[in-house]
Image (tube, grey):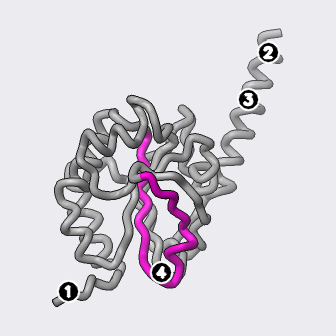
Amino acid sequence: MKALVFAMLGVVAVGLASTASAADLKVGDQAPNFTLKASDGKTYKLADFKGKQAVVLAWFPAAFTSGCTIECKSLAEHGDMIKKYDVTYFMASVDALEGEKGNIAFAKEHKADFPLLSDPAKETATAYGVLGQRGVANRWTFYIDKSGAITYIDKDVNAHLATSAEYMAAKLGELKVAEMQHQH
């Protein structure tokens, strides 16, 4: 009986592995569209930015955990560096929007002046291939150009959590995202 259970678990594990690779997005791929509710009360669709603006989608595992807090604080405190570019940036997780551990509360606590997207159904996380074994998103950041194509995928965000904003701004520069024209 034990052998049968282990064999079945093996099949499940293989099944999970294959679904993860199904959404193995690469640079040059069109970013999967999403329609997600955000911490600012709005609903955002990736399609709305097409032809208009670059988008950065920074997935994080869970609100109120240490790494995510460091990342969110960096983006909140040094967002001016990112805002020099013609880009909309989001943090996103599979957390609920509401509730004491939800993204609205998380955004409020760290004074995030950018939207945090909630994907409790995990459909967008699955489409982006970021859903990890524990059922939360991997800490991966997707850079998407005006045409909706992925220009860079940062899978090593943990290496520069405390300087997330600086890193993101530098990466936008490298990717030749247009700078904002100053309004006089």
Residue identifier under label 3: 10
Between 37 and 119, the one nearer to me in the picture: 37
Q: Residue at x 26, y 39 (%)?
A: 109
Picture layout, residue 96 above or below residue 37 = above
Residue identifier under label 4: 146
Q: Residue at x 24, y 60 (%)?
A: 165
Residue type (three-letter) at the residue carrying disc 1: His
Q: Residues within 10 Å of mark 2 (few under 14, many from 20)?
A: few
Q: Is residue 88 visible?
A: yes
Look at the numbered disc 4 and give the secondary structure of its residue: loop
Left or right: residue 71 versus residue 24 is: left
State how many labels appear: 4
Residue type (three-letter) at the residue carrying disc 4: Lys
> Residue 1 in the image: x percent, y percent?
83, 9
**Span shown in magenta:** 41-61
Look at the numbered disc 2 and give the secondary structure of its residue: helix
Q: Is residue 155 visible?
A: no
Residue type (three-letter) at the residue carrying disc 2: Ala
> How far is mark 2 from mark 1, CA to CA?
67 Å
> Residue 182 in the image: x percent, y percent?
20, 86
Q: Residues within 10 Å of mark 4 (few under 14, many from 20)?
A: some
Look at the numbered disc 1 and give the secondary structure of its residue: loop
Residue identifier under label 1: 182
Q: Residue at x 56, y 41 (%)?
A: 120
In the rendered image, residue 47 lying in the magenta stretch gets the answer yes
Quick one: label 4 or label 3, which is nearer the N terminus? 3
Label drawn at residue 115: none
Quick one: label 2 or label 1, which is nearer the N terminus? 2
Residue identifier under label 2: 3
